[in-house]
Image (cartoon, grey):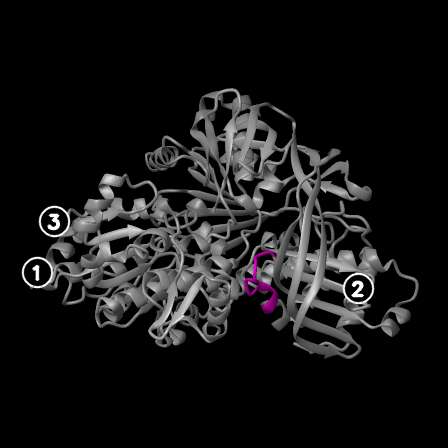
Amino acid sequence: METVPAREGRRTDWPDWTPPLLRDRLTAAGVEAPWQHQATAAEHAHAGRSVIIATGTASGKSLAYLLPSVAAIYEEDARREGTVLYLAPTKALAADQLRALRALRLSRVRAATYDGDTPRDERTWVRQHANYVLTNPDMLHRSILPSHARWGAFLRRLRYVVIDEAHGYRGVFGSHVAHVLRRLRRICARYGVEPTFILASATASEPAATASRLTGLDVVAVHDDASPRGPATFALWEPPLTDLRGEHGAPVRRTATAEAGDLLADLVVEGVQTLTFVRSRRGAESVALGAKRALHEVAPDLADQVAAYRAGYLPEERRALEASLRSRSLVGLASTNALELGVDVSGLDAVVVCGWPGTRASLWQQAGRAGRSGQPALAVLVARDDPLDTFLVHHPEAIFGTPVEATVLDPDNPYVLEPHLCAAASELPLTEADHELFGPSTKDLLPDLVRRGLLRHRPTGWYWTRRDKAADLADIRGAGGAPIQVVESATGRLLGTVDEASAHTTVHEGAVYIHQGESYLVQTLDLDDSVALVEAADPDYSTTARDVTDIRIVERLRSTAWGEATLCYGTVEVTRQVVAYQMRRLQTGEMLGEKPLELPPRTLRTRAVWWTLSESQIERLGDLDLAGSAHAAEHAAIGLLPLFATCDRWDIGGVSTAVHPDTGLLTVFVYDGHEGGAGFAERGYANAAEWLRATSNAIAACECETGCPSCIQSPKCGNGNDPLDKQGALLLLAELLRQAPKP
């Protein structure tokens, strides 16, 4: 248990340029004066300095960008009236901001959302009349920038670009958004304006550097949080061991989803409005289902006050759930991180976080959903049975005594940059003046795009050559192709969608698919037509796909000698194929069986960090199960890397082998699971000594004898966690680290 004490707030005066009507409306809404950090950030923006406000959840970041934005619209000279473009990573957040804006009843602010849910006839009105447009990076990329001429009147007056929840723009998605913002700046320059950027972020390390990398501009950081907050109790919760034995006799813990479902039910019975964050769509559904089952037994009338919320639902379903949560007709909600990002649900009493959310920034963001009205709050982190979660609940100082991470993104990734150069050329011909804007890789990539027939080089610049849309080349969410539609075969009803990259593992034939608490079995997956047909069913098991992976070194970019051992970073080619799926009992995780699958292999060119041991080092270690030892070290290293790179266990993969054909030595790889890399393996290379020491310590500290999910077993292992050798992994890592740099 950790107690986070209450904090007093520090108010200051309204900036003297604040429109009187806005000040009156905010005062009437209970905002007597701004907090110090709100006013400081607003003053920077009003003076034309791009700024990032990186303070805690519920610290009122929206007021910091609302003040200068509304002031730009309320210019005394109506001819100088500015416009504002607001970008949110989710539709829910944009809809929430629109509701808050309209509640202020500011007659001159014509605010409207412009996203995939906006009807066609409304879109024309938004382009022609709105002066405060709320959208997302996807619509900016696919709709607004390609048809910038139709947005000319809006763009000519653009004063501010607001980027909300900026900490969410990381990895490949963040790298894509960085180029979408550069394209926006380029188009704005064409219309004679240089808008000021205002970024709002959860508390983050190096916020100014991160914001500069995202926007390509110099950005000032405001991170001294002056808002008050009520006291919070934070519990780290490890599910108990069961009497069952899993693979290779390892003890089986109760699953985090089963435990979170029971906790959610307990809190609902007590009338404590609770939001449970779960890592996956399936997990969110599973927690809601578990809570409903528990409530049916003890308080059947409360079962309808629990629901699930996730991406993939239809827009009207999501809006109805958000409204029910605000009105408290829903007391318990299990959600993916779709609700992490800023939707203003005040009055929540508790948050249950089911499994480490990937970063400390994300954990505090989720925990901060509770207690937003100043009342005492409860947050519970329920550990999953894996190395990182186990390490953290046994080392609370790694959560409470450590600053949050820096956000990792890599705009120079050629797989990200190339499609945006094409998109930019289709919007306005590229010139040599654009090389500085898009980065040093641009000069090398343009000749290749010309050779492939995507661009044509003329004395006046580089031109897009095709009839189809250049924006379609860049899949900014990294989904990789058309989404798979999940259709109920008996009725033809569209239940939801699954991105193409996850289809092989989530909607393969025989998979259990859950939608709004109802279970379905996948009958067929048609990759050509992008459809998965499902039928209603109620199996007492879940399914997990199993795959095999091969890796080939393409180019070694950096290497470091640790005595006889070598640490490397470079480009690799990974080939993965889903070959089977396993069935496990829902409540216990007990293995029930495995069935083969026939799916095509997928190839990924990406970046990896890897290490090798010399033959003489292996000889010194004596008689060792090399394959099992390397495999165990690989699993634990993957589990711990998210502590050192802002990533998720599912963003990275690994391969280990006693003798790799490209090195001729024992080699362990950890790679980015995104085309071209995402910066995670590079961060692992930079922090390798610290990361691999933590890996060794986590294995050594686990109380199991031969290895378990808390240390060396992996939930995504393609080989069914065989072979694994816990003691061998410790010996390998000790040998590797013997001459590694000291911290």
Residue 93 belongs to magenta span? no
In the rendered structure, which amino acid carries the disc numbered 1?
Ala
The quadrant holding residue 272 is top left
Name which of mark 2 and mark 1 comes first in the sequence.
1
Q: How far apart are marks 3 and 2 (CA)?
A: 69 Å
Q: Is residue 498 left or right of residue 370?
A: right
Task: First in sequence, mark 3 or 1: give its number.
Answer: 1
> Residue at the location (40% across, 75% down)?
435
| Mark-to-mark CA distance, 3 and 1 | 13 Å
For mark 1, give the secondary structure. helix
Q: Kindly identify which residue carries mark 1.
A: 78
Q: Are marks 3 and 1 in contact (CB under 8 Å)?
A: no
Q: Which residue is drawn at 83% across and 61% down?
A: 658
Q: In this view, does 492 lie to the left or right of 11?
A: right
Residue 703: give x, y in percent of width and height.
Answer: 76, 52
Residue type beneath disc 3: Ser
Residue hosting label 3: 107
Label count reads 3
Q: Name the residue under label 2.
A: 661
Main SS class of the magenta portion in the image: loop
Magenta-drawn segment: 673-682
Please tell me whether mark 2 or mark 1 is closer to you in this view. 2
Q: Is residue 242 above or below residue 112?
A: above
